[in-house]
Amino acid sequence: MPFPKGFLWGGATAANQCEGGYDEGGRGLANVDVIPHGSERNDVSRGLRRMLDFEPGYYYPAQTGIDFYHHYREDIALFAEMGFKVFRLSIAWSRIFPNGDEEEPNEAGLAFYEDVFRCCREHGIEPLVTITHFDCPIHLVKKYGAWRNRTLIELYKRLVKVLFNRYRGLVRWWITFNEMNMILHRPFMGAGIVLEPGENAREAEYRAAHNELVASAWATKIAHEVDPENRVGCMLAAGSYYPYSCRPEDVRAAQVKNQEDLFFVDVQARGRYPGYALKMLEREGIDVGMTAEDERILAENTVDFISFSYYSSRCTAGDPDSVGGVAEGNAFAGVENPYVRTSDWGWVIDPLGFRITINDLWDRYQKPLFVVENGLGAYDEVLPDGTIEDDYRIAYLREHIEAMRDAIEQDGVEMLGYTTWGPIDLVSAGSGEMEKRYGFIYVDRDNLGNGTLERRRKKSFYWYQQAIATNGGDL
Ligand code: P53
């Protein structure tokens, strides 16, 4: 068996992309609710266009998502049918604290997730819970400027104390923040940051990052105090940068871009700011507001495991203009790599890059790795007989699982598990589309919210079922 016994196979979702029920159960509004579908999504996500409430003339896909809020029993039963050992999902902060700064939590929100977790356990599925997957109560955005304000550290501590106590014994695997490095690319989507005219964006982003890093360390400490069985991880939008060529300038450029991402894991896994980051902040005149207590908390509360998403490798050059310029394949812009394929959305497809990225993370940190997102966003067609033949998705996943198997079997990397992104079709974070589908389960809903929401098994559903049943032996 190439995969270790007890390897955690499953799938991953996020509240803002599937739950819906945005105004039910006492839930408050969040940044993720007011990011529209369509041409302005990018500017709103980047914090360049202020939209802090629903505006007429826009469609907001998070309002309904795929209505997981009302379908979770059916959806979790389908995951169980595929043999999932783990299901990654996130908590909507504004269900627990609708404004974010109340003294007491909202019982209806707590009860909802308790039921979801119990439902997982009844099916023998371990919940893996992301505490914050991009969402921030809109009240905290308006009142405090979201994560650029240190008050959010205290409010996040309040949130996690409630969660760890309430779900003690029910949830053991926790991720504090999804893709913290997204702050540098999508500051509003990632951390509720709306940039003020003339504001130093880098300073706002690194302050937000610092506050999240400190909040994450506090959460790790509290999780371990409440239950020593808790395992807490960081989460990186990973995908190593390649140098465009062996020109030393290209190699150096790739090194610098990799450091920009790995900074977050360096702090969370090693417990202190790396020298290159301290020097960069000093050069740019950025003060993140580090206190003596922050330093201590960061040092004493490093993560138990390192989780990450991998979709693509990245490529960069010392002089991008000389090799075709910087193109936006996804949120991580780079120069074009002539040796790789791309998806319908222009995302690089590079299974060997997955093995390379896994090794880069393992070599640097020597902590167990958990792949918590990987997958292919693609158009699917429902054939007249009702089937969906998504062989392209099967091919992508097969090649990536094989690359991960090589990392374990041949490179000796310690891996805890693998959850594909969007095991059931859900709303795309980048584009707000429904028709960028990742699922093994098709959901009848289109980009503008039309459809019955009916669930339907794709061909890949049976393929993944077999892959899990054989612990990755039959791909
Ligand atoms: P979508 C870009 C690049 C890498 C990871 O993305 C990213 C993004 C965001 O576009 O985010 C993660 O839906 C994220 C998920 C997201 C998924 O990748 O744009 O954690 O919320 O849905 C896929 O295709």
Image: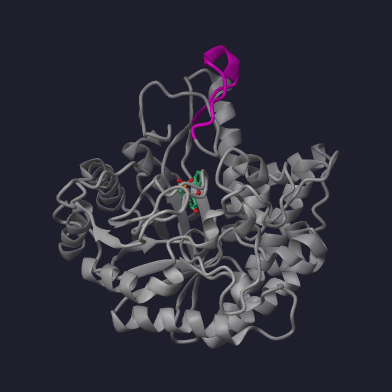
Outermost residue, top side: 322
At x 14%, y 50%, the residue is 385
x and y percentages locating residue 178 in the rendered image: 54, 58
**Rendered position, 272 above or below 112:** above
The total number of labels drawn is: 0
Please name whichever residue, 434 or 391, is drawn nearer the observer in this view of the structure.
Answer: 434
Q: Is residue 118 magenta?
A: no
Whether residue 416 is visible: no
At x 39%, y 21%, the residue is 338
Q: Is residue 325 magenta?
A: yes
User: Magenta residues?
Assistant: 315-329
In this rendering, would 251 be left or right of 52? left
Please name whichever residue, 198 or 332, is drawn nearer the observer in this view of the structure.
Answer: 198
**Rendered position, 72 above or below 435:** below
At x 36%, y 35%, the residue is 349
In this rendering, would 20 be left or right of 125? right
Whether residue 138 is visible: yes
Report which quarter residue 144 is drawn in.
bottom right
x and y percentages locating residue 217 in the rendered image: 64, 68
x and y percentages locating residue 45 in the rendered image: 64, 46
